[in-house]
Image (cartoon, helix red, strand yellow):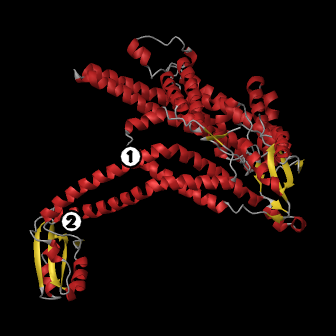
Amino acid sequence: MFLPARMRKLKIITLDRYSDSVVRSLHEEGITQIDDISERIQQDAEWAQILKPSRATPYTGRISSLLMKTSGILDFLGSVAAEEKGLRDTIREFINPPVFEKREVEELDTEALIERAEDILGRVESRTRVMEEKLNELDSEKANVESGLSVAEKLTAFDIDFGDLHDSKYITAIAGRMPLEQFADLEEKLSEITDEFLIFDAEADTKSERTVIIITLRKHGDRVAALLRRMEFERFEISELRGRPSEIISNSRNRLKEISEERREIITGLREVNREWEDELLVLKEQLEIEKERNEVFSLFGETEKTVMLEAWVPLKEAERAISIVEEASEDHCVTELEEPDPDEVPVLLDNPRFARPYENFVEMYSPLKYNEVDPTVFMAFVFPFFFGFCLTDAGYGILDALIGLILYRGLGKVNRFMRDFGIILMSCGVWAFILGMVTNGFIGDFFPRFLNIKLPTVIPAIDAFVNPQNILIMALAVGVLHINFGLIIGARNNIRLGNMKEALGSQIVWLILELGIILYIFGGMLLGAPVIVLAFAMLLYYNGLFGLMDVSGFLGTLLSYARLLALCLSTGGIAMTVNILTGLSYDMIPVVGAVLAPVIFVFGHLANNAFQSLGAFINSLRLHYVEFFAQFYLGGKNKFNAFCAERNFTKIRR
């Protein structure tokens, strides 16, 4: 519980014809991590004489291609289906997402799965390909029509047929708009190029611009265009326009309506395909993903002409089961060996009680553990929610946070493990905020005494946050001392276990001795306390040099960081009280309107304060662990256990 799971390296040799069965069995159980021995074979001459690196199976490319095609179809149909969902549907799915009922499937070999995938994709594509192509054509046409409509609307002042302005063998027409001050010089500057031009102009959308059509000989077109670019001319594309502006506008709007109707019919058809095939495609995608992992893992093995060798990491408590699985899958045609691992190579698997597992996310966010160091997850599972509650210390806000956590747990948590874990954490944090709020006189600020004229019966007067904040500070610092000391003890244990006695004495034990000296000085006087304090400073100088004395201020700063618990506690209560005051003032001082305004201020003010303070409580509770607590002992590693596991969210094997 307080150490990562004990691991063993499992070496397996089996006949080639059983390798697929062994891989499938281990993949379904998900209790091993396959190690890559192909590089070792290439680098080690002895191994190279016996083994050669294995390769991914020849089916891998086809499976990858089918998986990409399946994902593409699902994404396309999913995007079409999402267009019909509104805000209400989104909220409903957030609160109560649909749970896919796992479908029983047969255990297919690779060839059979490929054949099934090609059959399903062929049938789906036969229905979607034509509709998708037509949809793309309509979207492309819609963009062109909208572009032409936009240009025609800008040129409504010109009652001309744009078909007559298309470039011919002899003339070219340029349409666009330009700043009014530049237009004043247009004719003069065009005259410097040629006298063979016509200018038609009209008012633009803004008074500072002018809409212009210029007709000139084709041979002058490039020079005229270059001049216009220098004059901040925005050119309109008129080469595709036919008819007068009013006709183009009318025809374009009608065509856009037709496109919209045609598109709606196609999308209706695609949604029907999605309803019919989505479940089947999700099942197929999962099967292909699993099969792809199985076929790729062979590239990590070594092989001879008739045998295959692989190595896997397995938790010690699962080692016998893993061996049994291999023996059964290979019909006892195998050789297995368990080996004590090198601690520097072992992938780390956290092994905690169920209640603490959600907090593994926080530990892994910081850094993977080192194999032999203490796992702080269980301790964090108790302390983190307490720190959060200490920062918030409002029972009303705690109830709201716990309810949000419950919604996450029972909603998205059903389909998303991280949301389930976060929901559990938020419920725990809300419970602690409720408990500490009730004993420190925090329930939506001073709601009870201000509006109901009663006191919370659960308040402990000595730690009433509105009366005795100094006692809250003492509590915060006392909690900080305990928290830091526990980290120091863990750090000393880690260093002693690793043989770093000097580091343990100079970085952890010295502070415990210094604290002991201060306690003896306070309660026993100079005679008892002074020698211990002198010993602590001597150890600081001996193990850390003169810089060790500077560490005293750093250690003091670390302890004072826990004063933030008081700061956030008072901040929550102070702002909540301010919202209550504003609510009362608006109700009492503003006739009629105040009766409506006061509830709005109360509800939205407290919602905003709860959101802001909860975020602050979460961040600062995490900071006290990462910066103040973990810094005392956390060594950190680099290897995290990644199980070779068939993740089945939509399927289950028919037994």
The residue pinned by badge 1 equals: 83
Q: Considering only order in the chain, which callout, 2 or 1, is on the residue closer to the N terminus?
A: 1
Label for residue 622?
none
Give residue 651's position: percent from left, percent from top. Answer: 62, 41
Q: Quadrant of the C terminus?
A: top right
Which residue type carries mark 2? Val
| Residue 57, picture quadrant | bottom right
Q: Residue at x 25, y 56 (%)?
A: 256
Label for residue 151?
2
Q: Is residue 310 left or right of residue 437?
A: right
- The answer to which of 655 and 561 lies nearer the viewer is 655
| Residue 449, picture quadrant | top left
Vertical position of residue 127 compared to residue 401: above or below: below
Give residue 114's position: percent from left, percent from top. Answer: 63, 55
Q: Residue furthest left?
A: 159
Element at label 2: helix
Q: Alpha-carbon distance for marks 1 and 2?
A: 29 Å
Which residue type carries mark 1? Glu
Q: Is residue 355 visible?
A: yes
Give residue 90's position: percent from left, percent from top. Answer: 42, 38
Vertical position of residue 298 compared to residue 458: above or below: below
Element at label 1: loop
Q: Residues within 10 Å of mark 2 (few under 14, many from 20)?
A: many
Give residue 80's position: percent from left, percent from top. Answer: 41, 49
Q: Quadrant of the N terminus?
A: top right
Q: Is residue 630 left or right of residue 621?
A: right
Q: Is residue 36 left or right of residue 183?
A: right
- The answer to which of 401 and 324 lies nearer the viewer is 324
